[in-house]
């Protein structure tokens, strides 16, 4: 890896002041489980690394008037064990599925949302859009783990397991820069880059993601992950659902697919189809089929359509307590 | 870059020529049932947790060399040629190493490079180990095998004919396969037609991997035979037993199949192909078999008894994590009537007498015989010295329980320490040697082992995810020196089988020529929760004991892939032709079945 300057500020104000106007000036270090690999592979070579783990105000999970606030440096492990998370099994399942106990002890929720894609062409140095000679390597290449939604030119899948669960729960993130702060819905936080110079999230190089805010609204929620390996692996497809119930019927639903597109992928048509229904095998199956309608699989990843479908069905049954 | 499709490899294919036995054409005409299938097992890499590499220090005209190697005795000689120094100026050391699996014999160019750097730096120690990506790209690739097999049988399940077209790659060097071993283990079949084509591709070259060729041969054979059994509508175990007479060791395989069946509760869980119970999760059982040589290599050992009673046992072998040290200590301690803490074993150093490389399951036979002989010789010298003192003829003495005594008479004895004190100031130092051919005649070691693996899996037919429930392994290896470490070899082999059957695969990119998964994230290996329960039974019988010691490192790593692949076919009712049995492949096979 290249040499870099290391800073470990004690306050958020100092930290944002240490960031720069471009990604090569400085990058944020949280658990380091992804950033260090990226630096070792020369995929990013910031001049300065700004450790944010010593900043007290970025930690902790607490109740606020509007819901629950999760500090950016909260680890997966803290998150999954916290009493305030009991109402959010979809998030806990997603957190517990991540990698290994070691990564769950080091990795943070902020890092999970900001981690870079695992696409092997990107990690191999071909850029986010996997371009070689002006053409994406993905469609004619090894694309078994790539996107089935989004339609290109970005074919990587969003690596964040928490992302889909947070989108389904209607969560927001707070981004702070030297010039102020802004709050962005998690659904707006993830973006599909259209060119190699764009990024896959809305965060700017001088911003720090400081917290996640989950609204108080009570939902039945669940996540189902299809994983090849039981641990130390990324899911092949996931679904997170959150149901606002109206008696025994669904009032409104959020259904969000994971690891199938460059962003968490809301299945709006399935959400609509679920409204007013009670959840059983048949309605779950029907919504699942609708959720994957319009998928555009590549040469090797047609199976992910089936996996996403199964994930939706099983997440719905789980949320409804019928798994 | 790819060899999967033989019709597309063009001039990179080198057919090996056809081998025919009996009259396969006639046998197919007469066969009452025939079965055809395609099978594939990709290139996998060794993925040693400790990558290849070494520390080298040029010290005057001497070179101190600490490689990670499976062959301490020889690797320095090979390095000597590369860096052009006399071999006696290289001193090789290795106390521990983190995995080789057949890939760590030569010094390799990085050994020469490190030595050169040390020399250029005026003799500083240079540590040069491959990074993960390089390790997985060039430091070990096990050849693939693809096969089209046609088999024929009588209605009663008797196999009558085998025909296979196989092709394989081991990188740019091509990919040979010892096809005369087809059908594997069930080898005494009269009618066969065998064709093989080596395909060279632009990828890292092959290195030996635990039982070279055998896992692939076993996978292709057992899969094709299981498919034939399914075609016959016959229980797979009954079918394997029906054809037991054409195996290389009918009695042994019969007993082992029956034992494995008992352990996996075959009667309770077995069903004909396709689990017909309701729900998406289907369960199935499968069988795989193995065989291997395992004859101990040549080895020399020097044993020194010191006047204070301490004992050195020195030989230039190596411990790959298999407990070679412990085995040597056990043999020496037993000869001297001591506990294993009372003997000091020295290995991994070229100052010690030469022993062999640890490949081909040859270490245990080699080191135990040389150790036994050296210790017996040294003890003989001690008895000669004690005979006049104790007033007992030398051949009337024995060493038991930390004492030297008249045979069977503890009242005429002295402690080991007292006995050794009689040596005065002179130590006793004796050599012992294993020479393969002699040791076999003497009944100390042997070759030829057998084993059976059975797998019990559950397959989620909605997701294509295969979960291991149980795997049982029954394995013979002649006289078992230490059942615990022997079992541990088998456990490890079963875990490697789960990896290869369910996850492992080198993925190459056609467009860039690069390995896409030279890491430990997408080069997938099974974790603890992926392997299910493993149950090992060492096949210990008086008959096996009488054959002497035989190596065990490779054979248990052979049959597991076949067993798992067969269990999946048994569960879901259709063959998944290619391993690893990933969700995409399982789902593809299932959709074929639904269409078909
Ligand atoms: C084998 C393996 C399996 C894995 N499986 C999964 C999985 O199934 N699901 C999953 O979601 N993840 C998985 N991961 C990834 C893991 O979750 C991430 O590495 C982790 O979440 C990153 O968090 P971190 O705190 O270590 O981030 P770091 O490595 O410190 O940072 C990652 C990136 O985010 C930026 N960043 C971090 N925090 C902030 C912040 N507060 N504000 C602004 N930028 C920030 C950094 O600058 C960097 O670019 C896996 C990882 C491994 C190695």
Image: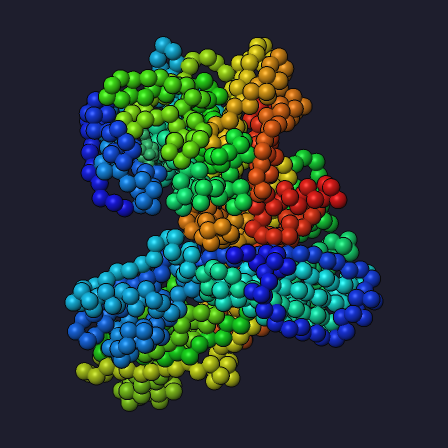
Q: Nearer the viewer, residue A30 or B540?
A: A30
Coordinates of residue B234 in the picture (x, y in percent): 76, 55
Please give the name of the residue rendered at 72% of the width and 49% of the height, measured from the top-left corner.
B273
Coordinates of residue A231 in the picture (x, y in percent): 46, 41
Coordinates of residue B425 in the picture (x, y in percent): 18, 82
Please give the name of the residue rendered at 30% of the width and 42% of the height, measured from the top-left corner.
A39
Q: Nearer the viewer, residue A141 or B544?
A: A141
Q: Which of the 4 quarters of the picture holds residue B251?
A: bottom right
Q: Is residue B415 shown to the viewer in this render?
A: no
Please give the name of the residue rendered at 64% of the width and 39% of the height, measured from the top-left corner.
B461
Q: Quadrant of ligand 1?
A: top left
Q: What quarter of the picture does the C terminus of chain B occupy? A: top right
Coordinates of residue B358 in the picture (x, y in percent): 42, 69
Q: Is residue B541 left or right of residue A168?
A: right
**Exactly how many numbered labels are in the figure?**
0
Please give the name of the residue rendered at 61% of the width and 49% of the height, measured from the top-left corner.
B456
Q: How is the image coloured?
A: rainbow
- Seen in the picture, residue B491 relative to A226 is either above or below; the reply is below
Q: Which of the 4 quarters of the picture holds residue B243?
A: bottom right
Q: Nearer the viewer, residue B104 or A265?
A: A265
- Seen in the picture, residue B356 relative to B485 is either above or below; the reply is below
- Seen in the picture, residue A109 relative to B447 is either above or below; the reply is above
Q: Is residue A7 left or right of residue B335?
A: left
Q: Is residue A215 shown to the viewer in this render?
A: yes
- Seen in the picture, residue B164 relative to B310 is either above or below; the reply is above
Q: Nearer the viewer, residue B73 or A136?
A: A136
Q: Is residue A77 left or right of residue A236?
A: left
């Amino acid at each position: 890896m290249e040499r870099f300057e290391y800073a470990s500020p004690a306050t958020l104000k100092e930290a944002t002041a240490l960031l720069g106007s471009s990604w090569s000036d400085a990058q944020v270090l949280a658990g380091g489980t992804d950033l260090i690999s990226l630096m070792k592979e020369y995929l990013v070579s910031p001049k300065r690394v700004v450790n944010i783990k010593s900043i007290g105000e970025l930690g902790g999970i607490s109740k606020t008037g509007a819901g629950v606030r999760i500090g950016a440096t909260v680890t997966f492990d803290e998150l999954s064990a916290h009493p305030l998370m009991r109402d959010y099994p979809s998030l806990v399942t997603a957190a517990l599925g991540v990698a290994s106990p070691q990564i769950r002890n080091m990795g943070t929720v902020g890092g999970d949302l900001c981690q870079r894609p695992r696409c092997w062409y990107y990690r191999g140095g071909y850029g986010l859009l996997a371009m070689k000679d002006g053409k994406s390597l993905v469609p004619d290449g090894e694309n078994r783990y790539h996107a089935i939604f989004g339609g290109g030119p970005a074919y990587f899948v969003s690596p964040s397991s928490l992302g889909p669960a947070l989108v389904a729960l209607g969560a927001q993130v707070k981004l702070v820069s030297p010039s102020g702060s802004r709050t962005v819905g998690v659904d707006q936080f993830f973006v599909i880059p259209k060119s190699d110079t764009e990024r896959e999230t809305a965060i700017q190089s001088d911003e720090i993601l400081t917290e996640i805010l989950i609204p108080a609204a009570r939902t039945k929620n669940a996540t189902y992950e299809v994983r090849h390996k039981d641990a130390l692996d990324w899911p092949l497809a996931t679904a997170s659902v959150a149901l606002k119930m109206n008696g025994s019927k669904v009032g409104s639903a959020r259904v969000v697919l994971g690891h199938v597109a460059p962003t968490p992928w809301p299945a709006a048509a399935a959400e609509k189809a679920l409204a007013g229904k009670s959840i059983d095998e048949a309605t779950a199956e029907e919504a699942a089929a609708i959720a994957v309608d319009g998928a555009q699989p590549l040469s090797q990843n047609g199976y992910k359509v089936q996996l996403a479908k199964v994930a939706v069905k099983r997440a719905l049954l789980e949320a409804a307590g019928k798994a | 870059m790819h060899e999967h499709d033989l019709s597309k490899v063009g001039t990179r294919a080198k057919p090996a020529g056809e081998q025919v036995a009996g009259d396969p054409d006639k046998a197919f005409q007469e066969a009452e049932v025939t079965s055809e299938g395609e099978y594939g097992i990709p290139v996998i890499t060794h993925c040693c947790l400790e990558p290849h590499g070494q520390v080298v220090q040029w010290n005057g005209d001497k070179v101190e060399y600490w490689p990670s190697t499976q062959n301490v005795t020889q690797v320095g000689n090979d390095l000597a040629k590369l860096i052009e120094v006399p071999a006696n100026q290289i001193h090789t050391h290795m106390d521990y190493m983190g995995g080789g699996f057949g890939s760590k014999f030569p010094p390799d160019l990085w050994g020469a490079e490190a030595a050169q750097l040390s020399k250029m730096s005026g003799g500083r120690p240079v540590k040069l180990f491959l990074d993960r990506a390089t390790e997985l790209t060039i430091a070990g690739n096990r050849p693939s095998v693809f096969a089209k097999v046609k088999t024929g049988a009588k209605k009663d399940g008797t196999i009558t004919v085998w025909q296979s077209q196989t092709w394989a790659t081991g990188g740019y060097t091509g990919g040979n396969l010892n096809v005369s071993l087809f059908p594997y283990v069930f080898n005494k079949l009269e009618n066969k037609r065998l064709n093989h084509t080596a395909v060279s591709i632009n990828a890292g070259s092959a290195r030996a991997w635990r039982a070279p060729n055998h896992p692939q041969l076993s996978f292709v054979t057992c899969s094709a035979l299981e498919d034939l059994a399914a075609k016959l509508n016959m229980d797979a175990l009954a079918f394997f037993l029906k054809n037991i007479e054409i195996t290389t060791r009918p009695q042994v395989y019969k007993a082992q199949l029956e034992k494995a069946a008992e352990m996996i509760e075959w009667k309770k869980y077995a069903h004909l192909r396709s689990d017909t119970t309701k729900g998406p999760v289907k369960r199935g059982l499968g069988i795989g078999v193995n065989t291997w040589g395992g004859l101990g290599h040549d080895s020399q050992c020097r044993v020194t008894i010191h006047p204070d009673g301490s004992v050195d046992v020195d030989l230039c072998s190596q411990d790959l994590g298999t407990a070679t040290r412990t085995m040597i200590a056990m043999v020496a301690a037993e000869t001297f009537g001591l506990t294993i803490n009372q003997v000091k074993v020295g290995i991994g150093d070229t100052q010690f007498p030469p022993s062999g490389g640890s490949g081909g399951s040859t270490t245990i036979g080699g080191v135990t015989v040389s150790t036994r002989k050296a210790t017996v010789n040294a003890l003989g010298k001690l008895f000669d010295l004690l005979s006049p003192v104790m007033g007992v003829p030398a051949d009337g003495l024995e060493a038991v329980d930390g004492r030297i005594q008249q045979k069977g008479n503890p009242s005429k004895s002295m402690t080991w320490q007292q006995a050794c004190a009689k040596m005065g100031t002179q130590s006793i130092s004796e050599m012992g040697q294993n020479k393969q051919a002699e040791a076999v005649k003497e009944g100390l070691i042997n070759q030829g082992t057998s084993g059976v693996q059975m797998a019990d899996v559950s397959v989620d037919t909605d997701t294509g995810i295969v979960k291991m429930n149980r795997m049982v392994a029954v394995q013979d290896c002649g006289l078992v020196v230490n059942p615990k470490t022997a079992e541990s070899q088998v456990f490890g082999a079963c875990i490697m089988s789960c990896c290869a059957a369910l996850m492992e695969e080198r993925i190459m990119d056609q467009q860039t020529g690069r390995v896409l998964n030279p890491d430990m994230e997408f080069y997938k290996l099974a974790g603890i929760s992926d392997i299910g329960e493993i149950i090992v039974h060492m096949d210990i019988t008086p008959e096996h004991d009488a054959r002497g010691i035989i190596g065990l490192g490779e054979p248990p790593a052979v049959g597991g892939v076949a067993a798992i692949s067969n269990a999946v076919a048994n569960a879901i009712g259709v063959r998944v032709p290619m391993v690893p049995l990933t969700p995409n492949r399982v789902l593809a096979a299932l959709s074929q079945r639904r269409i078909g």
